[in-house]
Amino acid sequence: AFMLTMKIKFADFQPPHAPANVIIVKAEPRQFSEEIEAIGTAESNESANITATVTETVKAIHVEEGQSIKKDDPIADLNDDEQNAQLQEAAKSYHRYNELLSKKLGSAADRDTYQAQMDVAQAQLNNHHIVAPFDGVIGLRHVSVGDLVPPGTLITTLDDISKIKLDFAVPETYLAMLKIGMQVKTESVAFVGEKFEGQIYAIDPRVDPDTRSVMVRALIENPDHRLRPGLLMSVKLVKRTYEALAIPEEAVGSNGDAHNVLIVGADKKVAQKNIEIGLREPGYIEVKSGLAQGDQVIAEGQMKT
């Protein structure tokens, strides 16, 4: 019997090479916005607590909770029988004396006194008829017909939410760049992924000495009434907008504080280049130095390369 011995040099074995599948993109200019971030609370454009000014029984309520009403629309009536009687009596007295005056049987001063009494009676009657001070939306009702309400009793609320005021604090270091009319972008956890835009319309003339910040108020159009007073909203204030070279975020590798990309040259060979990065926009990152416009970088497949 013969034994055949074969020696194999594993070091000589080379696996077959296959081209790496990668995605290449060009470095191109994009628009970037330098922004200041803050947190604000939404408020009504106008807000009022609708209360009674006299002690009387609720006679009628003319609105529904959540109803939109116009300025001077009736909200509620209090019992006004006594006030109606007083106004009728004052009006009769005034008209009687006015007739006497026309016959030169009285004085103008006395006629003015009766006029004043009639005006006071009318004002007292008006206090029993509660109307809307501005256009708005009625809130929850706190009284019912037949309730005896003393002055100051909350009947309901009225809010103008066709526009929303948003107050937020900005560090004093940015005071010089704040201007009336500047654009703001806002978001709320109540509407994930949606952005609401507005403009600064008021800047507090005082800087808070404790927080070293200034209060800013923006106005946001809210025609569909989706935003509500009290919402916590994140605010982005656009400091400046500019154009800069950009590449996809996934194209950038990191090594400590250093950043690099894989670049494909005209000879189809790959080289690693260090770059300096700047601001980020969704999906993209600013390249301050290290690349030129049109340079081809590998966005996907770096490990294969």
Image: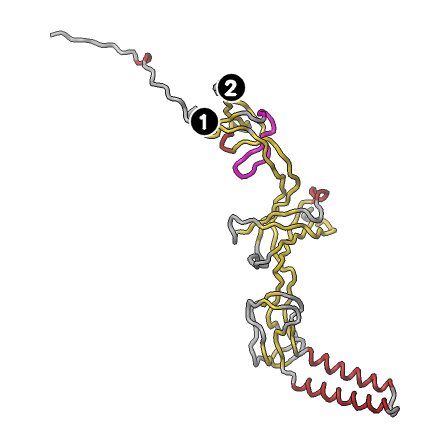
Q: Secondary structure at mark 2?
A: loop
Q: CA distance from mark 1 to mark 2?
A: 18 Å
Count the labels in the image.
Answer: 2
Residue occupied by mark 1: 302
Q: Which of the 4 quarters of the picture holds residue 111?
A: bottom right
Magenta residues, dominant SS class: strand
Q: Which residues are magenta?
A: 278-292
Q: Which of the 4 quarters of the picture holds residue 2?
A: top left
- Point out residue 71 in the picture as x, y percentages from the top left corner: 66, 69
Q: Are marks 1 and 2 in contact (CB under 8 Å)?
A: no
Residue type at mark 1 is Gln
235 above or below 22?
below
Q: Which of the 4 quarters of the picture holds residue 149?
A: bottom right
Callout in the foreground (1, 2)? 2
Q: Secondary structure at mark 1?
A: loop
Label at residue 229: none
Q: In the image as oriented, which residue stretches furthest toward the top?
A: 2
Label at residue 266: 2
68 above or below 96?
above
- Point out residue 104 in the picture as x, y percentages from the top left corner: 88, 91
Q: Would residue 15 appear left or right of 264 to someone viewing this image?
A: left
For mark 2, does the 10 Å Cα neighbourhood hold few (<14), some (14 to 19), or many (20 or more) residues? Answer: few
141 above or below 206?
below
Q: Nearer the viewer, residue 264 or 172?
A: 264
Q: In the image as oriented, which residue stretches furthest toward the front?
A: 102
